[in-house]
Amino acid sequence: ATKPGVGRRSKLTDRQKRVIKLQQVRDDTLSLNDLIRYVQTSFNITVNRRTVSRILNEFDMFSYVAPRKPRINHRQRYSRLQWCYQHLSWAEKDWSNVIFTDESNFEILNRKNRIYTRRFRKDLKRFERSQPRVHKGGALKKKKYSTKLKKCGVGIWSYLTCHGLGPIVFYDGSLNSDKYIDILDQHLPTAYEKFLPQSPHSKIFQEKKINPISWPPNSADLNLIENMWSILDDKLLKYNINNTEQLKTALKMAWMEISNDTIQKLFESMSKRIRQIIKRRGFASHY
């Protein structure tokens, strides 16, 4: 066995290691290269990435990808909490009667961007560190290539029920209220067919006696179909996409790959989402 104290002596003292940890705590987005430059400037010592990473791991600090979550203000937190308490008693059977709808925009390039953070493994407030984002809704972006404006993405709409996914509906331009109503009139009735004929709710749907649920603001983590957009985006990584037609084809194929087990797990998670938001005082859940 190796005796204590035998081996190469560490370049950094215990105090210097604590200083490195303190810099990471003050700014959890500092990369290993940033810390290497800090050590070089402050202590005039040259270290490599592996050394800095090992020091941080000794303090139980590890790298994580900061999730993208909407910025939630105090009023929105109150609305989210109020909504969650109202639906806290809902069981999985109740949520199985809900149709989740939403629209999204998928781009050909630059669909993913990540911010890595380094936090303590047992940090209970790690969920509060996220990438703030603004929901883009159904607006399509356009980028300029030379002298022409070309679409760099497509807008899609669909719905989600406990019995399966709805069809993908593509639309051009911004999705205003008139377009949205037209899409609902044309495609939402197909959701009725996904419910069992024996279900008493199927007749209510056929008569269009649908009761829309009031939704709290900035609550994408409560809409199950938002998870479908993320799953769909991950599946697109294996496709070679160079234009909008290829993007549409890839979206249709990836949409069909989503299994019913994935859908069932999402519906089973609704109660957990609500309890987690209540526990986090209205802040975004990890879903």
Image (spheres, rainbow, N blue to C red):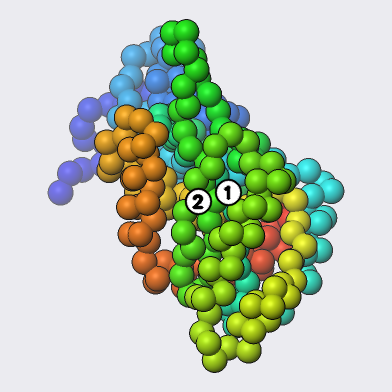
Which residue shows up at 15% across the image and 49% down it?
A: 1
- Taking the spot 40% from the left edge, 26% from the top edge, the residue there is 32
Is 286 left, or right, of 53 in this rendering? right
Residue 115 visible to the viewer: yes
Q: CA distance from mark 1 to mark 2?
A: 9 Å
In the image, residue 76 lies at what x, y percent? 79, 49
Q: Could you classify mark 1 by the number of other residues whose Cα lies within 10 Å: few (under 14), some (14-19), or many (20 or more)?
A: many
User: Which label is found at residue 169?
Assistant: 2
Estimate the x, y position of residue 264 in percent, counting from the top left.
46, 73
Q: Is residue 59 visible?
A: no
Q: In the rendered structure, which amino acid carries the disc numbered 1?
A: Glu
Identify which residue is drawn at 63% across, 89% down.
200
For the residue labelled by badge 1, is the local secondary structure a helix, a strand or a loop? strand
Q: Residue at x 54, y 91 (%)?
A: 198
Quarter of the image where one finds residue 243: top left
Q: Where on the picture, by quarter, is residue 278?
A: bottom right
Q: As drawn, which residue projects farthest toward the left?
A: 1
Q: Is 225 situated above or below 271? A: above
Q: Position of residue 205 (x, y in %)?
A: 65, 77
Q: Nearer the viewer, residue 96 or 57?
A: 96
Query: SS for tag 2?
Result: strand
- Residue 165 lies left or right of residue 10; in this view the side is right
The picture places residue 204, in percent across and down from the top left corner, at 68, 81
Residue ranking furthest to the bottom: 198
Mark carried by residue 103: 1
Q: Nearer the viewer, residue 232 or 34?
A: 232
